Amino acid sequence: MLLTIDVGNTNTVLGVFDQDTLAHSWRVKTDPRDTADELWLQYRALIEGFEITGLSICSTVPSSLREIRSMVSRYFSKLPTTIIEPGVKTGVPLLVDNPKEIGADRIVNTLAAHTLFGEDGPCIVVDFGTSTNFDVVSPAGEFLGGALAPGIEISVEALTARAAQLRKVELIKPRSVIGKNTVEALQSGTIYGFAGQVDGLVNRIIDELDVLYPNSGDVTVIATGGLAPLVMGIAENIDFHEPDLTLIGLRLIHERNN
């Protein structure tokens, strides 16, 4: 079985694949202070009972990636391991000014989105995490660039930290857009506000894609990331929700390299 590990700034998502099927997945917090041994103890408890035959890893946290490399060398040294970095075959051309700036997770998502949804035309991946990433994929599976916006949770935390009379609230859909109290007003501004941001940016990206690829078919919009459920059913331009998109991309890249 293949162990896939996606290390994000806030959470780390792990998944175990039995060939093409995701057998199980976990979401744990990312702590950049964790050592290789601490990571091993945590991961070992999760994957107990699964026979791991390979690993595929991406990380946007340099300190965590360093410790994961150490963990792999100590505890998985005999297993084929793919770490998404320069030199790894991804099959994703990066049509941007500086390819070295592109996060590994965005490359992985591009491959997965094109493989799963790219037969009919371009794709847009909206990844709701610490930041909200809009990744644009050409009909040929090329990464064209995109947009980066502050994430939902960090935006709310920044607001409540700077406004003395506001407090953190549960991020759920309120009973109406017009909030009748402070909690509902914050929920409305957050949930409907970010849904509107998604729709606005997606519409502008689609307009540019229509110019670049006038006869390429409809644009498919895929939502992923831990906070995606907050706007599902509210943002009007999202076609599919694939929570395991990054893990699927890690599996696909591992297959290309082993």
Image (spheres, grey):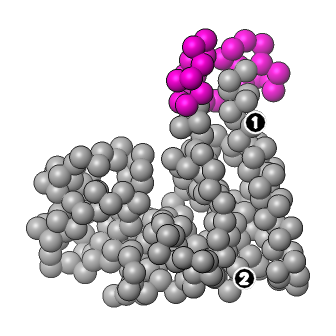
Q: Main secondary structure of the magenta part?
A: loop
The residue that disc 1 covers is: 192
Residue 196, visible in the rendered structure: yes
The residue tagged with tag 2: helix, strand or loop?
loop
Quadrant containing the C terminus is bottom left
Q: Is residue 170 magenta?
A: yes
Q: As shown in the figure, which amino acid type bears the numbered disc 2?
A: Pro
Labels 2 and 1 touching (C-beta < 8 A): no
The residue that disc 2 covers is: 139
- On the image, the x and y values in percent for residue 232 come to 69, 46
- On the image, the x and y values in percent for residue 24 come to 39, 57
Vertical position of residue 106 compared to residue 181: above or below: below
Q: Nearer the N terminus, badge 2 or badge 1?
A: 2
Q: Residues within 10 Å of mark 1 (few under 14, many from 20)?
A: many
Q: Which residues are magenta?
A: 157-184
- Residue that appears at 66% across and 76% down: 144
Picture disc at residue 107: none
- On the image, the x and y values in percent for residue 47 come to 25, 57
